[in-house]
Image (tube, rainbow, N blue to C red):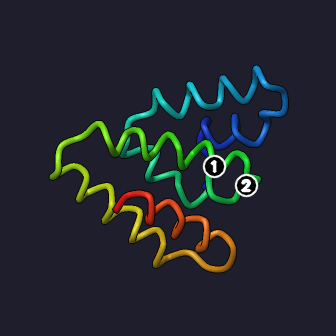
Amino acid sequence: MSASSVVLRGIDARTFSEMESFVKDLEARPVERLLRDLHELVELPITKVSLVSYVIHAKFRAVEAEEKAKMRDSVAATYEATVGEAKERVGQILDRLR
């Protein structure tokens, strides 16, 4: 499976302007697609994972309780399917959604 455009943008982002563009792409992405790409996004460098976590948390705060439960379930499923350092990173994102 090839990486999504947001993952590729995250990989390529090096300058402040590119990081800003990466965040705007994350913010514009529908929640479902963002969560679908989470297993790849948590493999990015920790600074970029922090940006991903921030955007997911902001989207989480903006939705109703039913959607929050779906988001938590999706992140929890990714957590269960992930290993190593990536699992820790997903766990940190999951902790923010409580």
Q: Residue furthest right?
A: 14
Mark 1 Cα shell of 10 Å, populated few (<14), some (14-19), many (≥20): some
Determine the secondary structure under disc 1: helix
Vertical comparison of 85 with 51: above or below = below
Picture layout, residue 26 above or below residue 11: above
| In this rendering, position of residue 95 left or right of residue 24 | left
Checking the image for residue 94, the label placed there is none
CB under 8 Å between callouts 1 and 2? yes
Q: Is residue 95 left or right of residue 4?
A: left
Which of the two residues, 93 or 22, is positioned nearer the viewer here? 93
The residue sitting at 39% across, 71% down in the picture is 77
Does 53 sit above or below residue 90? above
Q: Position of residue 37 (x, y in %)?
A: 52, 51
How far, Cα to Cα, is label 1 from label 2? Answer: 6 Å
Residue 84, image x and y in percent? 67, 79
Q: Amino acid at mark 2?
A: Ile
Residue 6 placement (x, y as % from top left): 60, 37
Above or below, comparing residue 4 to residue 36 in the picture: above
Q: Residue at x 32, y 55 (%)?
A: 71
Q: Is residue 33 left or right of residue 69?
A: right
Name the residue at 54% across, 65% down: 92
Residue found 73% across the figure and 48% down from its top: 47
Image quadrant where one finds the N terminus: bottom right
Q: Which residue is mark 2?
A: 46
Residue 50: assigned label = 1
Q: Residues within 10 Å of mark 2 (few under 14, many from 20)?
A: few
**Label 2 SS:** helix
Q: Quadrant of the C terminus?
A: bottom left
The amino acid pointed to by label 1 is Ser
Please state which of residues 66 and 6 is positioned toward the viewer in this rendering: 66
Q: How many marks?
A: 2
Q: Estimate the x, y position of residue 57 in percent, counting from the top left.
A: 43, 46
